[in-house]
């Protein structure tokens, strides 16, 4: 766990093609702790072994899967796809899960139960972004506005290709990457962007930023009281410049809390 100090930052932008990212507004947060890395396949396996927990995908009997070669924006429902075999049983041997991969194909409901079992919770959207930015201002990534860091190396796992027919793998990975494959941000948070979308506690609303903007800032925002989808942040290995450009610190994803996708994971936080 990383101790995140009390502080404030500006969330959102003054102008954007995506209206759910505006306006830029002041957020004030109390101190909290956040897990340095995404919850791994091994950690979730231990949780299931201990509790006999059955995930949303296992109850449904299927999960949403994307793989190289598919058309942009397309997903397919695959029978037997779940956290153990997030690409489906047919591809389980070809695309095996590793202990240090982030667990995926877990719903918001699954993530919440896991965090609660540890005496923790999912981060609010504001808590997630504050920790991911690590004190940086209006930039797309914790190190700047380019996917490459100052050393010339790509700093995150995302899709490089003109379409999803083929990934050039310039970052070294086709699908998931180990949770500590890339350097952390300045506060020690690994995968603040890329690799997998990260569940947050907040319900999604396209005009939430507008409704909560206050001259003196808002403290510890918790999102709307109700909604149909939960906010996800950070982007994933399936995001690309040509399609979903959500990998970064501004883009607000949204997904139904019981939905299961093989590019979504999570990390937990705790109050100090």
Image: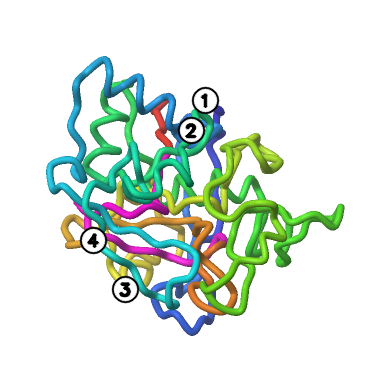
Label 3 and label 2: CA atoms lie apart by 27 Å
Q: For residue 130: magenta?
A: no
Residue found at x 26% / y 57%: 78
In primary-sequence order, the first of circles 1 and 4 is: 1
Residue 100, above or below 51: below
In primary-sequence order, the first of circles 1 and 2 is: 1
Query: Which residue is denoted by mark 2 in the rendering?
Result: 34
Question: Which x, y percent locates residue 27?
Answer: 47, 54
Q: Find residue 218 and name its label.
A: none
For label 4, the SS is: loop
Query: Which residue is denoted by mark 1 in the rendering?
Result: 1
Label 4 and label 2: CA atoms lie apart by 23 Å
For the residues carrying marks 3 and 1, which lies nearer the camera in this image? 1
For label 3, the SS is: loop
Question: Which x, y percent locates residue 31?
Answer: 48, 33
Please report contact status of discs 1 and 4: CB closer than 8 Å, yes or no: no
For the residues carrying marks 4 and 2, which lies nearer the camera in this image? 4
Q: Residues within 10 Å of mark 1 (few under 14, many from 20)?
A: some
Q: Find residue 207 and name its label.
A: 3
For label 2, the SS is: strand
What span is colored magenta in the figure? 248-266
Please report contact status of discs 1 and 2: CB closer than 8 Å, yes or no: yes
Q: Find residue 229 and name its label.
A: 4
| Quadrant where the image shows the C terminus | top left
- Taking depth in this image into account, of 162 and 20 the one nearest to the observer is 162
């Amino acid at each position: 766990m990383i101790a995140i100090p009390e502080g404030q930052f500006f969330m959102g932008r003054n102008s954007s093609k995506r209206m759910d990212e505006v306006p830029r507004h002041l957020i004030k947060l109390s101190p909290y702790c956040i897990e340095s890395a995404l919850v791994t396949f091994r950690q979730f396996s231990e949780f299931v072994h201990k509790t006999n927990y059955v995930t949303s995908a296992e109850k449904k009997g299927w999960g949403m899967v994307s793989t190289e070669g598919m058309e942009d924006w397309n997903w397919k429902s695959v029978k037997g796809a779940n956290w153990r075999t997030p690409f489906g049983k047919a591809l389980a041997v070809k695309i095996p899960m590793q202990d240090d991969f982030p667990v995926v194909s877990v719903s918001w409901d699954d993530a919440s139960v896991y965090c609660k079992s540890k005496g923790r919770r999912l981060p609010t959207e504001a808590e997630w972004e504050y920790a991911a930015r690590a004190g940086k201002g209006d930039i797309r990534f914790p190190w700047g506005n380019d996917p490459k860091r100052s050393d010339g190396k790509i700093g995150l796992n995302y899709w490089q290709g003109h379409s999803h027919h083929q990934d050039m793998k310039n970052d070294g990975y086709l699908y998931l990457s180990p949770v500590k494959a890339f350097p952390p941000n300045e506060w020690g948070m690994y995968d603040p962007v890329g690799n997998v979308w990260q569940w947050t506690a907040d319900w999604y609303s396209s005009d939430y930023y507008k409704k909560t903007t206050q001259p003196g800032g808002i403290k510890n925002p918790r999102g709307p009281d109700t909604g149909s989808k939960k906010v996800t942040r950070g982007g994933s290995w399936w995001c690309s410049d040509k399609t979903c450009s959500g990998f970064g610190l501004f883009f607000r994803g949204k997904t139904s809390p019981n939905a299961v996708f093989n590019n979504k994971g999570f990390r937990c936080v705790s109050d100090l």
